Image (tube, helix red, strand yellow):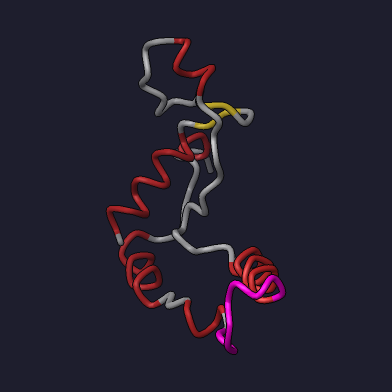
Amino acid sequence: MRAYVRAIRNYNDALKDGKIAGPNAKIKDPAVYRAITPQGCNPDGRVNEASLKKDLKFYQEDGLVKGNATVEQAVDNSFVEAALKDLGPYKPMAMAGKK
């Protein structure tokens, strides 16, 4: 989990103005940059529970998920919480070193 959170943070630090263009962006071919659609990740490794709840409700209403499962039953934040105890909260690279 620590490696995953570090990777998310490196990815987020490569984003600038909604594009992969920040200080961690190492792709040399500009055509690759134009072809990539960046996606968002929580830099502290947490899942978007509100979004998962909307998805689950949709699938339940469509009959694709049966039963009374809840997002709270499925999400276990213990691993991410343990990783964050070691890594600390996210500090964007652009803010590193500023007081």
Q: Which residues are magenta?
A: 61-69
| Residue that sits furthest to the front in the current view | 63
Q: Position of residue 68 (x, y in %)?
A: 59, 89
Identity of the residue drawn at 43% across and 75% down: 77
Identity of the residue drawn at 42% across and 78% down: 76
Taking depth in this image into account, of 51 and 67 the one nearest to the observer is 67
Q: Is residue 8 magenta?
A: no
Residue 42 vertical position relative to residue 54 in the rendered view, above or below:
above
Taking depth in this image into account, of 29 and 58 the one nearest to the observer is 58
Left or right: residue 86 compared with residue 88: left
Left or right: residue 86 compared with residue 92: left
Residue 64 vertical position relative to residue 42 in the rendered view, above or below:
below
| Residue that sits furthest to the left in the current view | 3
Quadrant (top left/top right/bottom left/bottom right) for the N terminus: bottom left
Identity of the residue drawn at 29% across and 59% down: 2
Q: Position of residue 55 (x, y in %)?
A: 64, 65
